[in-house]
Amino acid sequence: MGHAGPTPEGERPVLNTTIMLFLVQDGITNGAIYALLGLALVLVFAVTRVILIPQGEFVTYGALTYATLSAGQVPGTARLAVAMGVVAFGLDLFAGRRSLHPSLVGRAFAVNIILPVVILALTSWLAGRQTPIAINIALSLLIVAAIGLFLYRIAFQPIAHTSVLVLLIASVGCHLALQGFGLVFFGAEGQRGPTLSDTAFTVGPLRFSGQSIAVYAITVAFIIGLWLFFGFTLYGKALRATAVNRLGARLVGIRTTLSGQIAFLLASVIGAISGILIVPITTLYYDTGFLIGLKGFIAAIIGGLVSYPLTAIAALVVGSVEAFSSFYASNFKEVIVFTLILPVLVLRSLAAPAVEEEKD
Amino acid sequence: MKQRLPIMVFALVMAAIPFIPGMPPFWIVLLDNIGLAALVAMGLVLLTGVGGLTSFGQAAFCGFGAYTTAVLTTAYGVSPWLTLPASLLVSGIAAVVLGLVTVRLSGHYLPLGTIAWGIGLFYLFSKLEFLGRNDGISGIPPLTIGPLKMLDPGTIYFAIWIAVLIAALLTMNLLDSRTGRAIRALRRGHVAAEAFGVQTPRAKLLVFIYAAVLAGLSGWLYAHFQRAANPTPFGAQAGIEYLFIAVVGGAGYVWGGVLGAGIVVILKEILQSYLPYLFHGEGQLETIVFGILLVVLLQLAPTGVWPWLMARLPFKPKRRPPDTSLTLPARKRTVAAPAVLLQIDNARKQFGGVIAVNNVSFGVQAREIVALIGPNGAGKSTTFNLITGVLTSSGGTISVLGRNINNAPPQEVAKLGIARTFQHVKLVPDMSVLENVAIGAHLRGHAGAISSMLRLDRSDEARLLAEAARQIERVGLGDQIDALAGSLSLGQQRIVEIARALCVDPILLLLDEPAAGLRHMEKQQLATLLRQLRDGGMSVLLVEHDMGFVMDLADRIVVLDFGTKIAEGAPQAIKTNPEVIKAYLGAVA
């Protein structure tokens, strides 16, 4: 992430108002990204009970796919989407083998085969041409969204009924595999992408780039959008119902697999957007996403994995703590950020009501 | 001794392996690594598989063990063997500190919390000056026994595998004991365990510390095996891998940890050495395959490989039947029991705006069967939960033998001799009937974790099991004593709960719908049993919907409706009470 801390080793600059404002600004920009990721994690957990460790991979995939497209190359993620689509199609056919209606096969074929193949064809065709940024962004989002969707279909849908622990371990497996693929596709070198907008303006000592404004705007838009979606739409309520009681949701006609797919789709898009937003500011490596995702986690945990506004506020706190600790004790930045969770956990355990959990 | 035979064979095989002529030293290194991983995985088996507490942070505890000995031996010149207790102590203390915070967390908070402090500690190891930052500490002296220096993988092999075998034995002993049953009950929620006096937070902390100490031992061995310590093997990735090992092997089984370590370490080695030839690829192909295999494995065998193998064994291990001639001393009672055992005065429970129990008062006398009846939602089970301390009351007093037990924790209520069953059966389904029932006698045993591990608890344990077997016989389930509780019919499971409650040696038995799911004959047997218990001096308070059963059995009936007591009296009077008829059948009936 963008490091504001202008700290040469050893010599400690004095914190004045300008630096403090810089740190606050940096913290808010980082925090906004963590908020987006935290929201996605809350969303996925609430609907599927999956603790989505690979959220970080969605970030790097989005960022590096965008950077690769901008460099005029075909990203490996487009091919991965096709491969995962084929597997997902196979699983769909296998799952529906007792009643293979043409409509079912057709739908599965369209979603799992045609969609990723079209995306791949499009990226190959566009490679080497001067494509506008908007198209690159759209393509990156499509590719990562497809991967997110297929990831749920392949890895989680078959074990959707199992315990949180089993889902968590599967999630770790997905993280390992996707991170390994990331290294194959993007190499060990870090990459940066072109900025979304080069405009900038200054208020007092602070300089606001168009990029950071975009970060704030998109984060706020997503928070409001998710709040509206879950609070006021039928699909949003169906998703919440799935989260509370899978069987009950099925009995009233909610397709729980669809809920899971929507959740993963949203999460992967949010992750990819976060990645595209930060890749112009900071150099991303194939494995950077894991740490970024975990900081989103801290925010999500502070938010109790249920509350969107609380998660967003917590994310800003995490971002600010990170910025300030990189100023005061840059060596221990990560230690401080990850230790931040302990007092929160203490508070949560004190406040947690002693409810009986019916575990399977 | 028969149960120990496979372990002795395994120990002999492991001891013989280094002496096989032509054994490649590389394989010995591999076995060393398997042993080191198995130690950590075994702790996780107890913590995650048995206790239900998922931890991604075990690698950090290895780090505590490794760095403790690294610092003490290199900077202070302490002899390696002397650092062993120090390493274990440091990991244990770290576990107490982290455990006090994390162990109380419910469900998914725990794994997330462990990821967070796991990573935090990793960065701490890699930034601290006196731990050598990212480079770590090298030049750690080898373990020595007299003139023998354990410099090469072939000699430290024995140290590692002796540690594995001892740890496995201690862990199995612990699981097969009074404390072990309490730990095994944790995974199914704490209400049932606490109703029989188990201090669940303490039990959780215990397994957390135990797992951390095993990880610390692994770290200590690792430091002297590598003769160096750096942060990498103690990071989040390693923590994830240990959990993976436990799940692959079978997270609920001690030997699953060892098997999982073998599978994963060997698999990683194969992947690392052959994948580059197959694909000519650069990069971490093994992590991709590793991750995919993990997902596939979970879909095919979510419980792991060890139980899958055990199910295919031609012979089944059998346990010795308990010697029922042993007896437990009866629980201490107050000398002159007053006539009124349980007195409830204006008990009240509000959930937000809902008044579930509205100033209800009644009493239970000695040698009396009282039935608590009422339509669904009348507050019967809530009343039970108030009496047994599961819920805190919003008002009124509840006293047992003249002692106020308002909002006493469930364990204290159990100590007074109040035992209960649950409306929704709360047994541990993968434990045998005998073991489930023995949890009821938890407060009548005394052996702690250490004495259980060292098998000093056997006479205590034998008496507990004998008592459990007697109560199972008494409720008529003698044939099912070794069956898994989850395999019984729902009606039988309710009877098992009664046997478990009887193991408390109670003065008052609270039964929540005991006859539900029973056949006619079984109900009659149950009624006979309850009458016998009453005539033997016990009191019974039961919630039941089967009116025939209740009217026939109860000495007195208390009727609740919408949280309020509407009638109390002998069965004959209740049958004709207009209020009761109105509550059950409606106003015009």
Image (cartoon, grey):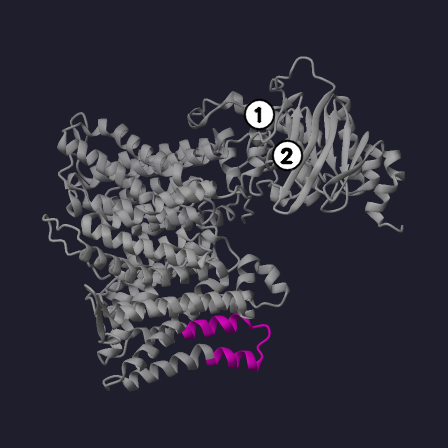
- Residue B571 rendering spot, x and y as whole percentages: 85, 34
Marks 1 and 2: same chain? Answer: yes
- Residue B564 rendering spot, x and y as whole percentages: 74, 40
Q: Which mark is residue B464?
A: 1
Q: Residues within 10 Å of mark 2 (few under 14, many from 20)?
A: some
Secondary structure under the numbered disc 2 in the rendered image: strand
- Report the side of B397 relative to A304 (left or right): right
- Residue B140 rendering spot, x and y as whole percentages: 16, 36
Badge 1: chain ID: B
Which of the 4 image quadrants contains residue B13? top left
**Viewer-proximal residue, B499 or B189?**
B189
The kind of secondary structure the magenta stretch mainly shows is: helix
- Under mark 2, the amino acid is Gly
**Viewer-proximal residue, A32 or B67?**
A32
| Residue B455 seen in this snapshot | yes
**Viewer-proximal residue, B586 or A291?**
B586
User: Pointer 2: what residue?
Assistant: B395
| Residue B441 seen in this snapshot | no
- Under mark 1, the amino acid is Leu
Region rendered in magenta: A85-110
Residue at far front of view: A204
**Residue plotted at (50% across, 31% down):** B199
Badge 2: chain ID: B
**Viewer-proximal residue, B401 or A268?**
B401
Secondary structure under the numbered disc 1 in the rendered image: helix
Question: Where A267 sits versus B6, above or below?
Answer: below
